[in-house]
Every structure is written in C-alpha cells, then in structure tokens.
Image (tube, grey):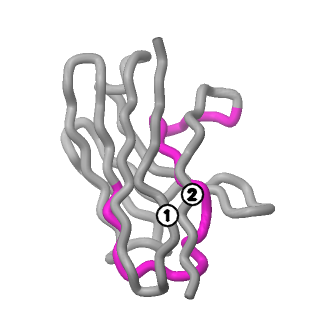
Amino acid sequence: QVQLVESGGGLVQPGGSLRLSCVASGSSFSINTMGWYRQAPGQQRELVALITVGEITYYESFVKGRFTISRDNARNTVYVYLQMNSLKPEDTAVYYCNRQFARSWDYWGQGTQVTVSS
C-alpha cells in the first residue's frame, strides 16, 4: 500500500527554523530519488530539493544554503527530512514529499503547512 505522510509544519517567525519529516512506504520509494515540493496559495507546485539513494543532494536556488534534505532507508520505507533554517515569508506553502518526477496525477500525501509570519 502506497503511503506518503508529511509532518512537522507550523507557524514560525521570519528567521526561524522547522524540520519536516516524511514517511514514504510502498511503491519502491526506497530505491528512488526523493524530493520535497511545495505549493503556495494560487501557485503551482514546485520542486524544493532532491536526494538520491546515494544521498547526493540538489537544491533549488531559492533555498540553497538555508534548507538541508536528508533520508533514511528502511525495508520498503524511506524517511525523508527537510531542515529549514532562516525561513522567509515567501517560504509559506504546503510542503509535500514524493519521488523525483512525480506528476500531478500521481499519488500525493496531504502535505504539511508551513507559515512564516511575524
């Protein structure tokens, strides 16, 4: 059974930090490059960061140096984390994890809301 469960979001002041967690089970997630995506109100979902099985990472320019993606693989399950530092109001969005190249019609979890506001 495919499952994607994101958690760790919340309300934080500008400059603050949050750590997001994702549990991805089933559908061979553990052998895929995984990523964090986000969708702000009225905007399309966008990629934030990726991590390969070998833990090579990639970051979009707007989070590079502020966010860190990591993962732990277990049998049929992968745990993906996103450490977010120096948060800005423009980071406000619902954050999702999924495999690289996930399409809008693929299975997505409910996401976790991150709100950066004073």
List the residue tagged with mark 2. Answer: 113
Q: Are marks 1 and 2 in contact (CB under 8 Å)?
A: yes
At mark 2, the secondary structure is: strand
Q: Which residues are magenta?
A: 82-104
Farthest residue to the top: give it.
1
The image shows residue 47, relative to residue 78, as above or below, that is: below
Who comes first in sequence, dot 1 or dot 2? 1
**Residue at the spot 34% in from the left edge and 75% down from the top edge:** 85
Of 114 and 40, the residue lying toward us: 114
Given the image, on which type of amino acid does mark 1 rest? Gly
Given the image, on which type of amino acid does mark 2 rest? Gln
Marks 1/2: CA–CA distance: 6 Å
In which image quadrant can residue 31 be found? top left
In which image quadrant can residue 118 be found? bottom right
List the residue tagged with mark 1. Answer: 10
Residue 93 falls within the magenta-colored stretch: yes
**Left-right relation of 30 to 86:** left
